[in-house]
């Protein structure tokens, strides 16, 4: 462990859950007990966790969570930071682990879509033909993405099903590799696309963050947007100094912060460019 003081950890699991009120109490008590901060969403279809704390607290938190047979196999992605990116314990009951509002997106419908980061890197090194599909929002794509990835140009994940309907019919026979930050969105995007007739659909196991950990920044450009106070991490999983524009919700890099168009908190070069395009 270097001089960085905090561990940021995220993970999810799709599992049928009925005792949501009890689980809300359980996860909140667990976080408070071990002084771990961040968000936990519980729903009838599973849990989604994004939390942070001191290294020893995260270790104890995970150790106690592992004693629960329903959650002892959650795959967590970790990174370090000098700041604590969360300052509250938030546990909420949600209709979905990740909101999509699509009936034909049940992760249990597919089981063979996960592609390990090392295998993906080999495909890309070999210049294997794939349709690379970013399932994230526009402002996430703007900050960084895989080379030659398709930008769905969506503002929320709920718009993804409509975007899929715009894809060329020929893609249904192509090899499609999709990705998101930590993998949870792809757990729903993959069965959605399979049920819409796309035959060869893969998702990066553990998402971009796991790819960074295993393969670094190969075939990637820019940084990765994350939903906490760090705003963005680079391929070394280190925070970049980016800040969030409250006007357009884009991440503003250190370089862009030098622009005269950057007037925090509600104006940045993206805002100015958008206005100029509308004229």
Image (cartoon, grey):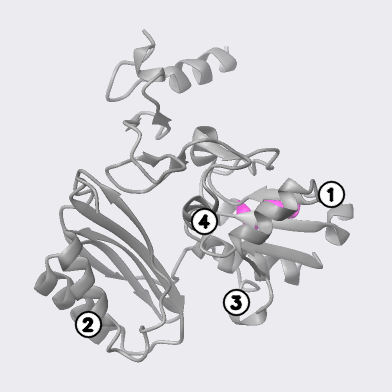
The mark that comes first in sequence, 4 or 1, is 1
The mark that comes first in sequence, 3 or 4, is 3
**Closer to the camera: disc 3 or disc 2?**
2
The residue nearer to you, when weighing 250 against 230, is 230
Percent x, y for residue 242? 35, 31
The mark that comes first in sequence, 3 or 1, is 3
Reading the image, the residue beneath label 2 is 64
Q: Residue furthest front?
A: 1
Reading the image, the residue beneath label 1 is 168
* Residue at position x 40%, y 76% in the image: 74
Exactly how many numbered labels are in the figure? 4
Question: Which residues make up the magenta segment?
Answer: 160-165
The mark that comes first in sequence, 4 or 2, is 2
Which label sits on residue 214?
A: 4
* Magenta: main secondary structure: helix
Report helix, strand or loop for mark 2: helix
Q: Is residue 247 magenta?
A: no
What is the quadrant of residue 187 in the picture?
bottom right
Which label sits on residue 43?
A: none
Q: Residues within 10 Å of mark 1 (few under 14, many from 20)?
A: few
**Closer to the camera: disc 3 or disc 4?**
4
**Closer to the camera: disc 1 or disc 2?**
2
The residue nearer to you, when weighing 41 against 33, is 33
The mark that comes first in sequence, 1 or 2, is 2
Q: CA distance from mark 3 to mark 4?
A: 28 Å
The residue nearer to you, when weighing 177 against 236, is 236
Q: CA distance from mark 4 to mark 1?
A: 32 Å
> Where is 227 relative to 271, above or below?
below
**Closer to the camera: disc 4 or disc 1?**
4
Q: CA distance from mark 3 to mark 2?
A: 29 Å
* Residue at position x 46%, y 64% in the image: 98
The mark that comes first in sequence, 3 or 2, is 2
């Amino acid at each position: 462990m270097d001089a960085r003081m905090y561990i940021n950890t995220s993970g999810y699991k799709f599992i049928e859950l009925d005792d949501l009120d009890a689980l809300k109490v359980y996860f909140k008590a667990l976080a408070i007990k071990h002084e771990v901060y961040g968000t936990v969403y519980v729903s009838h279809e599973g849990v989604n966790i994004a939390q942070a704390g001191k290294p020893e607290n995260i270790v104890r938190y995970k150790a106690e969570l592992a004693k629960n047979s329903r959650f002892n196999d959650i795959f967590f992605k970790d990174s370090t930071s000098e700041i604590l990116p969360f300052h509250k314990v938030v546990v909420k009951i949600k209709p979905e682990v990740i909101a999509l509002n699509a009936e034909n997106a049940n992760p249990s419908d597919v089981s063979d879509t996960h592609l390990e980061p090392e295998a993906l890197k080999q495909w890309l090194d070999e210049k294997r033909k794939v349709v690379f599909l970013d399932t994230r929002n526009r402002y996430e794509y703007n900050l960084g993405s895989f080379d030659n990835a398709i930008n769905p140009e969506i503002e929320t994940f709920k718009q993804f099903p409509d975007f899929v309907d715009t894809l060329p019919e020929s893609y249904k026979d192509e090899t499609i590799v999709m990705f998101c930050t930590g993998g949870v969105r792809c757990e729903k995007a993959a069965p959605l696309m399979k049920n819409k007739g796309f035959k060869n659909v893969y998702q990066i196991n553990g998402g971009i963050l796991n790819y960074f950990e295993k393969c670094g920044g190969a075939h990637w450009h820019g940084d990765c947007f994350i939903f906490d106070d760090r705003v963005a991490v680079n391929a070394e999983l280190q925070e970049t100094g980016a800040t969030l524009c409250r006007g357009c919700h884009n991440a503003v890099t250190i370089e862009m912060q030098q622009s005269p168009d950057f007037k925090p908190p509600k104006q940045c070069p993206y805002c100015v460019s958008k206005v100029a395009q509308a004229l």
